[in-house]
Amino acid sequence: MSETSKDEIEQVFKAHVPFAFSSYMIDLFCSKEITLKLRPNRKTKLGDFRPLNSSGKYKITINNDLNPYSFLITSIHEFSHLVTFEQYQGRVKPHGVEWRDNYRSLLRPVIEEKTFPKKLQEALIFSLFKTRTSSCLDYHLYKELSEFDDKKEGCFLEKIKTGAKFSFNGRTFVKLEMKRTRALCIEEQTNKKYMVHFLARVKPINK
């Protein structure tokens, strides 16, 4: 798999992140030998990082349907994995203190631009001091990022009452109980139980 060219990286970030941050992201991703790929919507992740492949290139994938601010933060998140891997060669936890330090360092320049909407700026500053494993687990940050989505159908699963029905990925579930960051749910058709993240966007089904 060949390295993504500088021109291709420029096209990606000029099209997918706010203009004020495109140059920073282009310089960042052009500083390493990376295969950068856009992927269709994935329900379980916004992006991912893969260590060196057989051709000696790192691979980063980002969902192509993210809003500009989510694309920016997810890209920084995954690039932080790359930097951490270079430093420790996989000898540390994926989202341990080493990754968090790199994430904060890479995020700080975009915050210092002070061009984010006020509430999002505040959420990002907070995330510098209380970084979780991903933006989706930082409830306040995720909610602010989701405000910029084109399609905001339904609601977060946490808003569904215990015992109520909802639709998710075209299937009908009943919410049984909350367990920390996930809810135990049962699929109506199969009677199988699943743990669904409390920030999953679902559609309530009225009785």
Image (cartoon, rainbow, N blue to C red):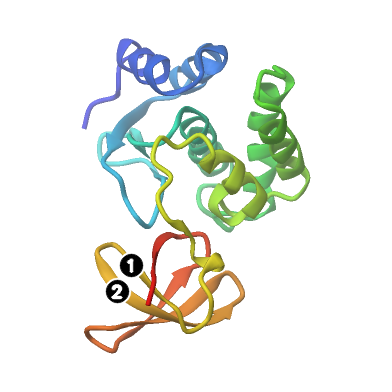
- Determine the secondary structure under disc 1: strand
Q: Is residue 145 above or below residue 160?
A: above
What residue did someone put label 1 on?
167
Density class for disc 2 (Cα within 10 Å; few <14, some 14-19, many ≥20) is some
Whole-percent x, y for residue 130 in the image: 75, 50
- Determine the secondary structure under disc 2: strand
Foreground residue, 165 or 11? 165
Tell me if 177 is positioned left or right of 30 in this view. right
Q: Is residue 123 above or below residue 111?
A: below
Tell me if 27 is positioned left or right of 187 in this view. right
Which quadrant does the N terminus fall into? top left
In which quadrant of the rendered view does residue 191 lie?
bottom left
Total numbered labels placed on residues in the image: 2
State the mark number for residue 205: none
Whole-percent x, y for residue 33 in the image: 39, 25
Of the image marks 1 and 2, the number of the one nearer the N terminus: 1
Foreground residue, 112 or 54? 112
Whole-percent x, y for residue 163 in the image: 47, 84
Tell me which amino acid carries mark 1. Ser
What residue did someone put label 2 on?
172
Residue farthest to the front, as pictured: 207
Q: Is residue 66 above or below residue 15?
A: below
Which quadrant does the C terminus fall into? bottom left
